[in-house]
Amino acid sequence: MSGQPQERARFWRHPAVPEVDLLKARYVTHRFSRHVHEGYAIGVVLDGVEEFEYRGELRRAGAGEVVLVNPDSVHTGQAGRADGWAYRMLYPSVAAVGEVAAELGLAYGTPHFPEPVVREPEVEALVVRAHRATERGDDLAASTLTRTLFARLLTRYAAPRPAAVLSPEGRRAARRAMEVLHERLADPPSLDELARLVDARPFPLLRAFKAATGLPPHAYLISVRVRQARRLLRAGVRPADVAAEVGFTDQAHLNRHFKRVVGVPPAAYQRAAGTYKKLP
């Protein structure tokens, strides 16, 4: 369509702060599937509107608003209007944010952000400045601004993480089921078999599993496969070999699910991680 904004995305690793990834993107038709991150997703919408499901509600973030998604929190992502949205995102690990929290003397354990969308011009500007400094290769400014951003967010918006409400039996069954899925990425059991392996009935296990993770087992499995694929890609493993190792049927299957979670294809992610090698 004439005049339709073009989708583009760039993914890279922070040059000066360990365990922080970055994404700069404009999406129009791209949709992120239901997924979780091991760490946080922190960013600012520059233009347009992003919609995302989060904690059972449809949220919207427009230009100038800051998005704060907690670790292991199920969410989606799609355009909230016809021309899509543009944003800059940081994906720090729990350790990266926790280190700043400890330096500030905050006794939060794993810091938690109760509100997924906030509007504060000073924080918006700080996200953009920190992000742009990484693009310029200014390590001192990038590291200073990134840690200043985390400190600002922690002191203004963080709170203790609420405890999950789950029976001891349900928690045990869900935890063991997660272990089984991690062990059997390439050969996962059926729901009935999974229930037998953890000494539970299928429906109570499904209910407990969703309460513990926010996802049903099959969606959780895809999330774990993508997570492991990221580790292998960073180690320099070929995408085709990664697909087989983590249980996807082929590279196209990996590509489809990887982009729905990460926002870029596996090869682009691998180049960003600095491990891409031109193959003969």
Image (spheres, helix red, strand yellow):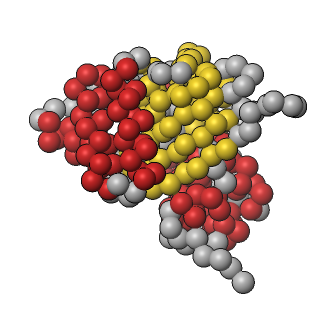
Left or right: where 124 falls relative to 32: left
Residue 106, quarter of picture? top left
Q: Position of residue 245 (x, y in %)?
A: 63, 67
Left or right: where 101 falls relative to 190: left
Judging depth in this view, the residue of 103 and 278 nearest the camera is 278
Any part of residue 221 in sight: no
Compared to residue 205, the image places residue 271 above or below, namely below
Compared to residue 243, the image places residue 40 above or below, namely above
On-image quarter of the C terminus: bottom right
Look at 63% across and 28% down and name the residue there.
Answer: 85
Residue 66, quarter of picture? top left
Q: Position of residue 10 (x, y in %)?
A: 58, 50
Look at 71% across and 40% down and name the residue there.
Answer: 7
Judging depth in this view, the residue of 123 and 195 nearest the camera is 123
Any part of residue 151 in sight: yes
Compared to residue 149, the image places residue 99 above or below, namely below
